Amino acid sequence: MSPEERCPECGAPVAGQRQGCQELFDTCLAREFSDYRYARAHRLSVDAYSLQHPSDYMRSAQSFAAHLTGMYAAFERSDWPEVNQAVQAWLSGPQTVQRLIHPSPLQRGALTILHVHNASEPDEHVARVREWAQSVWAAWQSYDHIAAAWVHDATVALRAARNR
Ligand SMILES: [Zn+2]
């Protein structure tokens, strides 16, 4: 494998570059879809992979906000299921979120999907998703207050809709 054989987005050292990286992710997703022991890592896997590949997975302002707030909620909110629900409702409504500039390629976390792909059993998979996502979130740390502001708006909007 030549030194160029790495994903140009996340830096995973993988033959086939971006396509090879995608295949690793698809294999991990297949585990999560086919076995409930892996499934609890699913939301975090999708958010982490999206934050490392924003030009594919965060092209719209809505998807940008959804994955960013998903990651924020996973690490910084104990009420993450409610947060994710509120954001989902908010993003399907008439809000206007702006898509922001994302971190540069290869600056989106020290670990990659390869770390998860190498897990040999469910508990290891789930733990590795968490480690990988933590490294991605560290790279996106400066977006923390933006995610918090969006979650705030989403929560306020949901409360207003319930009181209507
Ligand atoms: Zn990649």
Image (tube, helix red, strand yellow):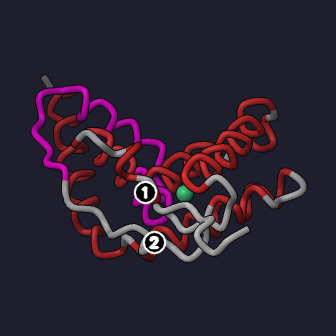
Q: What stretch is highlighted in magenta?
A: 70-99
Name the residue type under label 2.
Leu
Q: State the residue lying farthest toward the right.
A: 120
Say few, some or many: other residues with alpha carbon within 10 Å of mark 2 (under 14 / 14 to 19 / 20 or more): some
Residue 79 percent coordinates (x, y): 45, 52
Give the Cα separation between the discs numbered 2 and 1.
11 Å
Mark 1 residue's CB less than 8 Å from ligand 1: no
Name the residue type under label 1.
Leu
* Circle 2 residue: 106
Q: In this view, does 53 lie above or below 134?
A: above
Marks 2 and 1 in Cβ contact (< 8 Å): no
Residue drawn at 40 percent across, 60 percent down: 72
Instruction: Indicate yes or no whether the magenta region holds residue 86.
Output: yes
Q: Which of 88 and 125 is in front in this view?
A: 125
Which quarter shows the C terminus?
Answer: top left
Q: Which of 109 and 161 is in front in this view?
A: 109
Residue 64 percent coordinates (x, y): 30, 47
Residue drawn at 48 percent across, 62 percent down: 8
Residue 19 percent coordinates (x, y): 59, 46
Which quarter shows the N terminus?
Answer: bottom right
Q: Earlier in the sequence, mark 2 or mark 1?
A: 1
In the picture, measured across the screen, residue 102 lies left or right of residue 9, that is left
Residue drawn at 42 percent across, 50 percent down: 70
Q: Nearer the viewer, residue 105 or 31?
A: 105
Q: Which SS class for mark 2?
A: loop
Instruction: Indicate yes or no whether the magenta region holds residue 102.
Output: no
In the picture, measured across the screen, residue 19 lies left or right of residue 51, that is right
* Circle 1 residue: 51
Q: Is residue 134 above or below residue 153?
A: below
Q: State the residue lying farthest toward the top.
A: 164
